Image: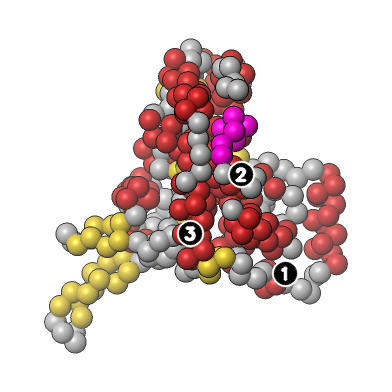
């Protein structure tokens, strides 16, 4: 556990060479890595969503693919396609960019439903089926997708089934005044230097697999498992929510809580780990009722009310 925490702190240090602030996003990305779960990052343009994901990929010694989603992107552009070979007079499968360990999908809501749906199988089962043949992904396999919540022209909303494939949804906000000043100064002082080239690899693929196995062994007391179940049940019974969380959300919250415990250097989960994970795990899995949404109530506010209303186990 000491080795895990030290190396993840090194990853944070590497990312901090370029990124100012955004500690919450980085923390959640690391938790997703340990949980072996996919991440959806939502924020306005220019808040370092894409560059942070790219920097994280550079700190891990694995294959990396970046896919820019566009309205004309086809499923075969992601998964691959069968091509007729003149050499042996047979069709050969040419793998698409999805065949990497670390996938960055930029502007995932820019492509239509059929292209988004191409990700369903690979994100859930870590395999794709083409022409009746199954191709399995190498471990680790992580998808990080970004989307802009402001623009609606030329975008296609992700359906609930697609959103449910993501372990976390991270909302990224604007930097503070101090952080904004640091960003401007860094750009001014290093205008001839590309800092992204200074990012060093910290973790190997085998180390990451070992860390993920270690996280699975973290202790969770029975009263904390019941605490997780109560949170999920409350989302289903909440009068402000049109749709509550599914059992998949329960399992996601359990896994994410273990990851946050590991990030804190503990081999056991506390209620604080569960509360910290709850927002990113649940905000995209619940739907606020239309009446409350018109009043300005958000999923995060309802989740906070649910957490405050449940007695914390001791």
Q: Position of residue 213 (x, y in %)?
A: 45, 53
Q: Given contact means CB atoms under 8 Å apart, are the residues at marks 3 and 2 in contact?
A: no
The verdict on residue 89 being magenta is no
In the rendered image of this protein, does residue 214 appear above or below residue 284?
Answer: below
Q: Which residue is mark 2?
A: 266
Marked residue nearer the N-terminal end (1 or 3): 1
Label 1 residue SS: helix
Between marks 1 and 2, how big is the CA–CA gap? Answer: 33 Å
In the rendered image of this protein, does residue 262 appear above or below residue 106?
Answer: above
Between marks 1 and 3, how big is the CA–CA gap? Answer: 30 Å
Q: Quadrant of residue 175?
A: top right
Q: Given contact means CB atoms under 8 Å apart, are the residues at marks 1 and 3 in contact?
A: no
Q: Given contact means CB atoms under 8 Å apart, are the residues at marks 1 and 2 in contact?
A: no
Residue extent of the magenta highlight: 268-274
**Badge 2 local density, few (<14 within 10 Å), some, or many (20+)?**
some
Query: Does residue 145 appear left or right of residue 93 in this picture?
Result: right
- Residue closer to the observer: 93 or 115: 93
Residue 90 seen in this snapshot:
yes
Q: What residue occupies the far left of the structure in this picture?
A: 89
Query: Does residue 263 appear left or right of residue 221 in this picture?
Result: right
Q: Position of residue 314 (x, y in %)?
A: 60, 22
Q: How is the image coloured?
A: secondary structure
Q: Position of residue 92 (x, y in %)?
A: 22, 74
Q: Position of residue 203 (x, y in %)?
A: 57, 65
Marked residue nearer the N-terminal end (1 or 2): 1
Label 2 residue SS: loop
- Residue closer to the observer: 58 or 227: 227
Q: Which residue is mark 3?
A: 210
Q: Which residue is mark 1?
A: 195
């Amino acid at each position: 556990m000491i080795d895990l925490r030290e190396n993840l702190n090194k990853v944070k240090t590497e990312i901090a060479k370029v990124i100012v602030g955004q500690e919450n996003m980085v923390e959640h990305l690391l938790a997703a890595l340990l949980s072996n779960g996919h991440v959806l990052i939502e924020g306005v343009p220019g808040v370092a969503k894409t560059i942070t994901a790219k920097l994280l990929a550079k700190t891990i010694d694995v294959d990396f693919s970046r896919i820019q989603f566009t309205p004309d992107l086809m499923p075969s552009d992601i998964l691959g396609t069968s091509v007729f070979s003149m050499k042996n007079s047979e069709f050969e499968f040419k793998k698409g960019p999805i065949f990497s360990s670390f996938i960055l999908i930029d502007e995932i809501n820019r492509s239509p439903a059929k292209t988004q749906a191409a990700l369903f199988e690979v994100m859930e089962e870590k395999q794709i089926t083409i022409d009746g043949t199954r191709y399995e992904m190498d471990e680790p396999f992580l998808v990080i997708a970004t989307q802009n919540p402001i623009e609606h022209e030329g975008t296609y909303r992700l359906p609930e089934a697609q959103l449910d494939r993501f372990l976390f949804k991270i909302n990224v906000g604007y930097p503070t005044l101090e952080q904004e000043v640091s960003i401007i100064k860094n750009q001014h002082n290093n205008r001839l230097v590309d800092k992204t080239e200074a990012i060093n690899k910290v973790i190997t693929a085998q180390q990451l697999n070992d860390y993920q196995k270690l996280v699975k062994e973290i202790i969770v007391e029975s009263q904390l498992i019941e605490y997780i179940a109560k949170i999920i049940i409350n989302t289903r019974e909440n009068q402000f929510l049109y749709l509550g969380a599914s059992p998949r959300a329960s399992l996601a919250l359990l896994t994410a809580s273990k990851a946050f415990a590991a990030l804190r250097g503990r081999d056991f989960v506390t209620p604080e780990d569960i509360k910290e994970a709850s927002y990113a795990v649940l905000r995209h899995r619940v739907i606020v009722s239309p009446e409350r949404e018109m009043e300005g109530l958000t999923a995060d506010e309802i989740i906070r009310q649910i957490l405050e209303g449940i007695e914390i186990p001791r």
